[in-house]
Amino acid sequence: MRQSKLLAPTLREAPSDAEAASHRWLLRAGYIRQLAAGIYTYLPLARRVLHKIERIVHEEMERAGAQELLLPAMQPAELWKESGRYERYGDELIRLKDRHGREFALGPTHEEVITQLAGDEINSYRRLPVTLYQIQTKFRDERRPRFGLLRGREFLMKDAYSFDEDWEGLNQSYRAMFKAYEAILGRCDLDYRAVEADPGAIGGEGETHEFMVLADIGEDRIAVCNTCDYAANIEKASSVNSDAAPPTITGSLITAPQPAQVQTPEVHTIDQLCDFFQSGPDHMIKTLIYTVDGLQSVAVVVRGDHEVNELKVATYLGVTEVHLADAATVEQITGAPVSFAGPIGLDIPVLMDRDVLLMSEGIAGANQVDTHLQSVIPSRDMVHAVAGDFRNVVDGDTCPHCGKGVLQLLHGIEVGHIFKLGTKYSERLNAAFLNRQGQRQPMIMGCYGIGISRLLSAIAEQHHDERGLAWPTSLAPYQVHIMPVSMKDTRQVELAEQLYAKLLECGVEVLLDDRDERPGSKFKDAELIGLPYRIVIGKGADQDLVEWLEHGMSDGEVISSQQAIDRALQLLHR
Ligand code: 9G3
C-alpha cells in the first residue's frame, strides 16, 4: 500500500476527553474516528486489524466445531416479551417501530433470536449438539460510553450459542469454548486471566467465566492467587476466613467494659473517626443501611477497612440487587444521620461480615447524632446479627482455593464472557427436541461472547509505547513499513521502490511511505501507526545501505538492502 493513497489521518494531539491510552493512540494514529458518543468509524488501518482478529476467531470457532451464521440485528419485540426481558432492560435496549408500527429492538445480544431458530429448526436429539456463532454489530445504549471502543453503544461481538441434549453435553460444549477462548486470546498476544464470574442478569444455572485482559484502565476488578490458578471477579471472589477465632466467653468478654457512648461532634468519615479515636480503620465497625427490592431495609456491617460486596448481600437475600438506602430512610431507621448508623439497637435484620465477628473490640455508630460507641465486642454485642461473607476481598487475603496463596487485586478489561444457561431460554421460547426416550425436552444451552472491537482496544492497551501503537506482528495492519527519508533523492526512491516490489512479490504486507513530507513528520507517523518492522532509506542508499528498526529500538541497525529483504522474509516466514 502507498501511504500517499492511504486514508490514515494522523493527529499531533488527542482530544482531552480521550482518557484511555488505546483511545488516544487509535485516534491519533488515524485508526478510528467518532461519529457520535460511543459510535465509531473504523478507518482502513483499524479495519485491517479487525479482519485479522476475526480470522483468528473464525479459525478457533471452526476448530471448536462451531458453525457460523448471521442473525438479523432487527429483533421483533414479541420475542423479548416472550422471554420476559422486554421490560427488564430499560433505556439500554434500543427500540424502534417499523412503517407498520410494529415494535422492534436493535439486538444487544441474540439469546431470543437464536433460541427461536433452534426451536423451529432442530427437533431431534440426532441433530444435537450444535454450536452456532456469528460476528455481528450489537447495539446497547450505554448511559456512559467511554474509553473509545472499550465501552461503545454500537460494537462488534462474536456471540456463540450451544445446544445440547443434556448437561454433560453442555459441559463439553462449554469446555470446548473455554479452550477456544484461551487460544484466541493467546494468539492475540494478550496477558489475560479467565476468572470465575457471576452470571448477573442473564441468569443461567451453571458456572460462568469472564476473560479479563490485565490493564489499569480496566473497569473490572479481579482477585488472582499468587500460588494456584484461582482467579475470580471481585463480585464473586472470596477468601479463607483467617483461622483466628472470635473472642470467647472465658476470655475477655466477662471483664471487658460494656459499649460506652462517646460524643463525636462533626465526625463523619472513617478517617475522621480514626483521627478522633487515634485508631486504625480495622478497629472501626462500619454499618450501611440497604433497601432490598425497594421496600425492606437491611443493615450490613463490615470492618472499617473493608467494602460491602452488594452482590454477595443480594445473593444471600435471594434478590437480584440491593441499593444503599437514601439519607431520609437511614434517619428514619437509625434515628440518626448516615455517618452515625450503628449495628446495635436496630429493628431491621443485620448482616455482619464474618471478619467483624473476629474483632476483639471496635468503635461503631451509636444511632444517635454526633455519638459513637466504643468497646463494642461484636461476638457479645451483636448476637442478633447473621454472620457471613459480605465483603469484597482485599490484597493479602488468603486464597480460598489453595489456602496457602495470597490474593492480589488487579484491574481487567472484560473481553469475553461465557455462560451455562441451561434451559432458561429454551423453556421460555419453547425450543424443545425429541430426546432418546421419545419425549419432548427443552434444549440445554450455553452462550459465549467476545467483544471484537473491544478486543482491538484491549490489544492496543497492552501493545503501545510512549510514541504510539506497537502491534504484535500477527495483528498489525501491515508488517513492514518502508520509509525513504527524502522523496527528492532519486536513489532513495529507487531503492525504496525495489524493496517494496520485492517484498510485495514475496507476499509481505508492506506500507510504503511515498509522501513528500518532512522526515520528522514521517517518522512521527510511523511511530504512531506502530508497524512491527521499519526499513528507513536515507543517505546510505547510494551504498545500498538501509536502517532496520523494530518496536522499541531507538536507533536502527544499518544493513544492506538484501539483508533487509532476507531478514523480513525470515521473520515473516515468507
Ligand atoms: C439487553 C441489553 C444489554 C445486555 C443484555 C440484554 C448484557 C444482555 C448479557 C449477555 C449475555 C451473553 C451472548 C453473548 C455473550 C454474552 N447486556 N447482556 O443479555 F437487552 Cl440492552 O449479552 N449474550
Image (tube, helix red, strand yellow):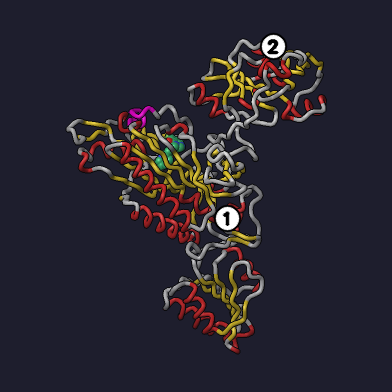
- The question of residue 82 being in magenta is answered with yes
User: Which residue is the extreme one toward the bottom?
Assistant: 543
**Amino acid type of disc 1?**
Gln
Q: Which residues are magenta?
A: 78-84
Is residue 165 in view?
yes
Q: Is mark 2 within 8 Å of ligand 1?
A: no
Question: Based on the displayed image, in which of its 4 quarters is residue 96 positioned?
Answer: top left
Q: Residue at x 48, y 76 (%)?
A: 570
Majority secondary structure in the magenta region: helix
Image quarter where the C terminus lies is bottom left
User: Label 1 to label 2, Cα distance in Å?
Assistant: 51 Å
Q: Name the residue nearer the viewer: 455 or 94.
A: 455
* Residue 335: mark in rendering: 2
* Residue, far left: 438
Report the residue marked by disc 1: 462
- Say which residue appears at 73% left-offset and 15% top-offset: 366
Q: Position of residue 417 (x, y in %)?
A: 45, 43
Please tell me in which quadrant of the rendered image residue 276 appears: top right
Relative to residue 184, is residue 18 drawn left or right?
right
> Do the CB atoms of the residues marked 1 and 2 lie less than 8 Å apart?
no
Residue shown at 71% from the left, 19% from the top: 251
